[in-house]
Image (cartoon, rainbow, N blue to C red):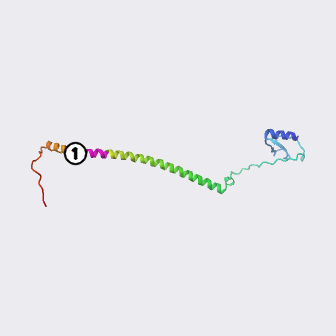
Amino acid sequence: MPDAAKFARSLFGFFRRSSAGGAGGEIGIAGIDVLGERQQGIYPMELPVPPQHSGELFDIGAILRLRTFLYLIAATALFLFQIHNTLSIRDLAQENERLREQLRISTSVRTSQELKAAELQGIHNISGRAQALGLISSAVPPVDIEL
């Protein structure tokens, strides 16, 4: 029978003690008794009993040490800080584009107003408007006021 146990171990790769059925010394694979009836104490190799899972909730504190937990918090904080910076840079770039567009529009309006003012201040425009109103240019020089 020990050859059957070795064969089953190599074939299936795992054994477990059966908790059902009497003495608790039966060896089974997936709930099936492999060795059948056996005598106690004949086989020198005793297989370890796997830990039974209780109905307790999973405790992450048992897995993580404080230092690991602090590293995770620091890495998460750095990751969130990087995301915040990236989003801020994107918002600033959009604001910069809006301001450049407003500056282009303002420059264009200012340039057109300067051209219009220069046109209105021109001597040909002033003399043409004066003639349209019936004013004529005088040959008398302007009066100088002395103080």
Q: Of 9 and 33, which appears nearest the observer?
A: 9
**Can residue 34 be seen in this snapshot?**
no
Q: Residues within 10 Å of mark 1 (few under 14, many from 20)?
A: few
Residue tagged 1: 120
Which residue is pictured at 67% across the width and 55% down the height?
Answer: 65
4 in magenta: no
Question: Is residue 119 shown to the viewer in this render?
Answer: yes
Position of residue 39 measured from the top left corner of the image (x, y, whole percent): 90, 44
Q: Quadrant of residue 120?
A: top left
Q: Is residue 118 left or right of residue 140?
A: right
Q: Is residue 74 above or below residue 42?
A: below
> x, y percentage for residue 21?
84, 44
Report the quarter where the C terminus lies: bottom left
| Residue 127 appears left or right of 113 | left
Is 69 located above or below residue 113 in the figure?
below
Residue 115 on the magenta segment: yes
Furthest residue toward bottom: 147
Image label count? 1
Q: Secondary structure at mark 1?
A: helix
**Which one is nearer the viewer's eye here, 95 or 30?**
95
Query: At 65% across and 56% down in the image, what residue appears?
Result: 67
Q: Which residues are magenta?
A: 109-121
Amino acid type at image mark 1: Leu
Give 129 or 51, whichever is nearer the viewer.
129
Q: Give the side of residue 121 with respect to residue 28, left or right.
A: left
Q: Quadrant of the N terminus?
A: top right
Residue 84 location (% of width, % of height): 51, 51
Q: Quadrant of residue 11?
A: top right
